[in-house]
Image (cartoon, rainbow, N blue to C red):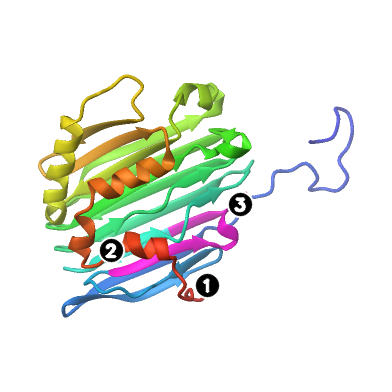
Amino acid sequence: MGPAAGASAAGPDRGRTPPMQRVAQGRLSFERAGAQTVLRDAYAESPLRLLTPRNHGEAAWVYTSTLGGGFVDGDRVQLRISVGRAARAFVSTQGATRIYRSPQGCESETIADVAEGGALVLAPDPTACFAGARFRQRTELDLAAGASVLLWDVLSAGRSARGERWAFDRCSLGLALRQQGRTVLDESWLLDAAHGALGGRLGRFEALATVLLAGPMFASARVALRAQVDGGPVRTRARLLESGSALGADALVVRFAAASVEELVGTLRDRLAVIPALLGDDPWRAARERVTHAPHAA
């Protein structure tokens, strides 16, 4: 709390809002090497960390994390991902992304370029914004001809067991998709407590999610998911609501709202059960077993 009206602050910087920290940079570069994909370049600045476990498939896997297990006030991170021609990449997180109380706000930006015939699966664990958090996230995906991407993004209600259900101040989630230079999706969701109490507005739902599939590699998964979304009955007080929209001929975006974070994540894995076969190994099993490999130096 600042000084009372008419009082002077002690010191020239007293009462000023500290400047935002510099943007911490990270980069990942995946390339095809024979029948496998290799990680040619991995770099991370604090607080970002990168973990690179082995797997038995043709895709290369990377898990991201942050020092301290989440974003603290003023953290700003930008991750650039490059997937080369015919390469296969899976990028996730080591656990849930926690956003702590942050009067200045925190920011996370992911920019991914996927070359011809390449494929990227971007499937982080849920993001949980705690009481008083202010968070901005932006994901930009740029696909060349014949490139593919599967993304899911889950936002949870926060620490509901501690009374912090939808208790953050502000959360902005931006997503853009370009295919061969043409923008087919550019959106931003905004949940702001200044517009009304979030808990009341979101009712019984404990999690929201967006799933995006684009490109030829995920064509069968896209068709199957659309059939499940369109074919499911809408029931009063349903624990799960979902709605899908086609984005041109080979892209689909699906929205979910669920009464349980665990149920929502389980539903996503069930609906996209074809993904382990496409990758050649099961990243969900690896996630359950936890990642124990040492991170790259920041």
Earlier in the chain: of badge 3 and badge 1, it is 3
Mark seen at residue 298: 1
Where is 118 relative to 202, above or below?
A: below
- Of 103 and 98, the residue lying toward us: 98
Which quarter of the rendering shows the N terminus? top right
Q: Which residues are magenta?
A: 60-78
Q: Residue at x 23, y 54 (%)?
A: 149
x, y (%) of residue 197? 55, 23
Q: Residues within 10 Å of mark 3 (few under 14, many from 20)?
A: many
Where is 23 relative to 9, above or below?
A: below
- Of 274 and 201, the residue lying toward us: 274
Q: CA distance from mark 3 to mark 1?
A: 18 Å
> Disc 2 designates what residue?
282
Q: Main secondary structure of the magenta part?
A: strand
Q: Is residue 77 left or right of residue 36?
A: right
x, y (%) of residue 251? 17, 44
